[in-house]
Amino acid sequence: MWKRKTVSTLTVGLLLACFLVGSARVSGWSNGGYSADPNNPDYGTHDWIAEHALDWLPLEEKQFLLDNKAVYLYGTELPDNGQAADGIGDTTKHHIYYLVDCSVQDDVAGDRAEEAYVKAVAAYNAGNFSEAAKQLGIVTHYIADMAVFGHVMGAATAWGAETHHSDYEDYVQTRTNSYVDDFDSFLVFDGSLSTLSAYDAALMLANDTTFDADGQLTCVWMDQHYDWSDAAFRNRSGESLNLAVNAVADVLHTFSVDATVIPEFPTWIVLPLFLFAALFAVALKKRSCSVLKAF
């Protein structure tokens, strides 16, 4: 279950200017590069988050993703990758901004996550499991980016533009570029799986990254205190990664509820069964009539 945190309202004295939302390109967690072969995708932080989210799902909920794991992981790079035939490359839409009163200023990444989720459900229900897996990989990207303080800050926000972004993500990449890696120690299952939409997962993660539960390790604090030798900074980074994995796990669990396939049997099986049932009903009716006449 996603443990939503109580957000402390920041000092009211902060002045909020009315800005238009900027459209500067924003990079995200790494995928280890763009994959030359979708069947053997390059591995990075996005893959690490998406794959570890599977660890906490029951087998029946994740089996189809395990069967389509390569394309699932490949999907995690597509929001950044505008070069591939099936790429998206909408990096200007990988952010969620909050106002100082905790209301939403811009929820574009949440919308993008939800749009991909709807496509995943439709593909799965149509029997296209490979496409469904790829779309779910795309979903995880938009959600996971919200664990990065640089994706909730910007010139159009009350927090200002971040100083540290790519350097932060590059450091994390070197510790999450394989399934078993240094930052695995931060991963802890929160104990239960809950129903959570892709949109809500993205917004709740962005909220936590922006404000922090105690109002201490906020996005601004992280940017101003960038120091991997600082235990508070390092642990907060690990906490955000862990929250991202738990949020993705909840969304994948929700998908198992929303996506249901009604088996379609071929006509050559259905027609004989129908005829047999009809003949059986006729025979039963005749027998009933014979019994009544006997009385």
Image: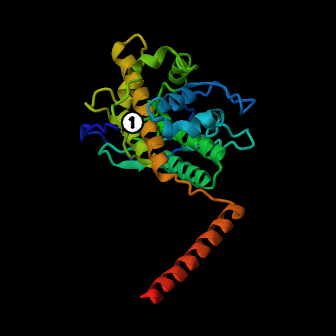
* Image: 138 above or below 29: below
Let me know if residue 249 appears in the view: yes
* The N terminus: image quadrant: top left
* The C terminus: image quadrant: bottom left
Q: Which of the pair 189/104 is nearer the observer?
A: 189
x 38%, y 49%: residue: 104
At numbered mark 1, what does the secondary structure look like: helix, strand or loop?
A: loop
Q: Which of the pair 276/75 is nearer the observer?
A: 276
| Residue 13, horizontal then vertical, whole percent | 25, 40
Circle 1 crowding by C-alpha within 10 Å: few under 14, some 14–19, many from 20: many
Residue 82 falls left or right of residue 202: right
| Residue 30, horizontal then vertical, whole percent | 58, 27
x 71%, y 33%: residue: 38
Which residue carries the number 1 mark?
A: 159
| Colour scheme in use | rainbow
| Residue 161, horizontal then vertical, whole percent | 46, 34
Q: Which of the pair 227/130 is nearer the observer?
A: 130
**Which residue occupies the extreme front position in the image?**
294
x 35%, y 45%: residue: 99
Looking at the rendered structure, the number of numbered marks drawn on it comes to 1
| Residue 78, horizontal then vertical, whole percent | 64, 39
Q: Amino acid at mark 1?
A: Trp
Residue 193 falls left or right of residue 55: left
Let me know if residue 152 appears in the view: no
Quarter-wise, where is residue 227 in the image? top left
**Which residue occupies the extreme top position in the image?**
229
Q: Which of the pair 91/193 is nearer the observer?
A: 193
Quarter-wise, where is residue 84 in the image? top right
x 55%, y 21%: residue: 179
